């Protein structure tokens, strides 16, 4: 069976990096706009290394830096 709806997720989104301005929203995490896919990738790697955290590459091309 799947995760119970009452259970709190065991991860935290620290940063969200996108190349689409429409996806830059106010949230608890750092949200960054990148001009290109290459700069998005570079920013994500730099942030993840600095924070020693994991990266998730989403199907829409955006990245999330998460703490598990």
Image: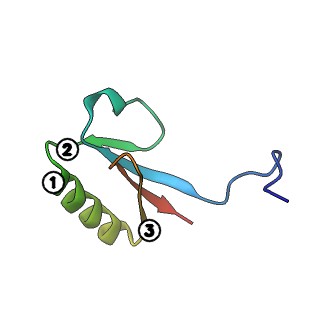
Residue 23: percent from left, percent from top: 35, 32
- Residue at position x 30%, y 68% in the image: 50
Q: Which residue is mark 2?
A: 34
- Distance of label 3 from label 1 (alpha carbons): 18 Å
Classify mark 2: helix, strand or loop. Answer: loop
52 lies left or right of 6 = left
Rendering quarter of residue 56: bottom left
- The quarter of the picture where the C terminus appears is bottom right
User: Mark 3 or 1 closer to N-term?
Assistant: 1
Q: Which residue is mark 1?
A: 39
- Residue at position x 27%, y 66% in the image: 45
Looking at the image, do the residues carrying marks 1 and 2 touch, with CB atoms under 8 Å apart?
yes
- Residue at position x 37%, y 67% in the image: 51
38 or 14: nearer the viewer:
38
14 or 59: nearer the viewer:
59
Say the numbered circle drawn on residue 18. Answer: none
Classify 18 as above or below 40.
above
Q: Which residue is mark 3?
A: 54
Number of marks: 3
User: Mark 2 or 3 closer to N-term?
Assistant: 2
64 lies left or right of 21 = right
Looking at the image, do the residues carrying marks 2 and 3 touch, with CB atoms under 8 Å apart?
no
Residue 40: percent from left, percent from top: 22, 52
Badge 2: residue crowd in 10 Å (few <14, some 14–19, many ≥20): some
28 lies left or right of 34 = right
- Distance of label 2 from label 3 (alpha carbons): 19 Å
User: Mark 1 or 2 closer to N-term?
Assistant: 2
- Distance of label 1 from label 2 (alpha carbons): 6 Å
5 or 66: nearer the viewer:
5
Residue 37: percent from left, percent from top: 19, 51
Residue 65: percent from left, percent from top: 41, 58
Classify mark 3: helix, strand or loop. Answer: strand
């Amino acid at each position: 069976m799947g995760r119970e709806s009452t259970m709190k997720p065991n991860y935290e989104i620290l940063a969200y990096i996108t190349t689409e301005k429409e996806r830059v929203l106010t949230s608890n995490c750092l949200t960054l706009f990148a001009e290109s896919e290459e700069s998005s990738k570079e920013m994500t790697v730099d942030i993840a290394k600095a924070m020693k955290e994991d990266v998730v590459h989403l199907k829409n091309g955006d990245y999330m830096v998460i703490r598990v």
